[in-house]
Image (cartoon, grey):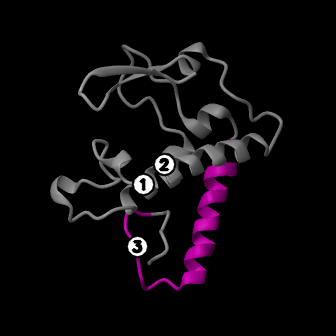
Amino acid sequence: PVLVDLDSSGFDTNIPRDQQIDENLKIMYRQMISNAKKTLLFLGQPYRAGDQPDPGAGSLENVPHGTVHVWTGDPRQPNLADMGNFFSAARDPIFFAHHGNIDRLWHVWRGLRPSNTDFTDPDWLDAAFLFYDEEARPVRVRVR
């Protein structure tokens, strides 16, 4: 039972709890307000077929999203099967609560100023992803 340090992938138990909470609040202000003055800065740049890898993550993608993925779970699991690995992250019940919170942060961010709007780019809105069902058959899931 430790408090997540949003500024790292680990935790420092030497930092007093109140100080860690204060640091986390400052980080969230930076990620939600200072570094996210428009939609693409908040959620990230589009990534389309043929693009160079890693076009640019939004402020929320790495912190708190990525930090909580790495922080949650037990790295002693075989093959590091915890929330920090793509192949096993969704097996952790925390995954769904975590992603629900990321959706909540998007909703909060949209209400902070009138210029914070939803995406209108059809490539973003109509994206599809390929997953496998319980019988290892490919299934295409559309975002919209």
- Residue at 54% x, 34% y is 44
37 lies left or right of 9: right
User: Residue 27, position in %: x, y?
Assistant: 59, 61
Vertical arrangement, residue 66 with respect to residue 27, above or below: above
Task: Tell me where residue 48 sits by quadrant.
Answer: top left
Residue at numbered disc 2:
96
Q: Give how far across and how far down residue 72 sits, in percent.
A: 39, 61
Quadrant (top left/top right/bottom left/bottom right) for the N terminus: bottom left
Disc 2 secondary structure class = helix
Q: Which residues are magenta?
A: 8-36
Residue wearing tag 1? 93
Q: Who comes first in sequence, dot 3 or dot 2?
A: 3
Q: Residue furthest left?
A: 78
Residue 35 shows up from this direction: no
Give the distance between the C-alpha atoms of the residues marked 3 and 2, in whole angstroms. 23 Å
Q: How many marks?
A: 3
Quick check: is 71 in the magenta stretch?
no
Residue behind mark 3: 11
Q: Position of residue 31 (x, y in %)?
A: 61, 51
User: Along the horizontal axis of the image, is 96 left or right of 28?
Assistant: left
Amino acid marked by disc 3: Phe
Front position among marks 3 and 1: 1
Q: Earlier in the sequence, mark 3 or mark 1?
A: 3
Q: Is residue 24 left or right of residue 6?
A: right
- Give me the residue at 52% from left, 47% from top: 99
* Quarter of the view holding residue 129: top left
Residue 64 location, x and y as percent? 52, 54
Disc 1, SS = loop
- Secondary structure beneath dot 3 equals loop
Q: Amino acid at mark 1?
A: Pro
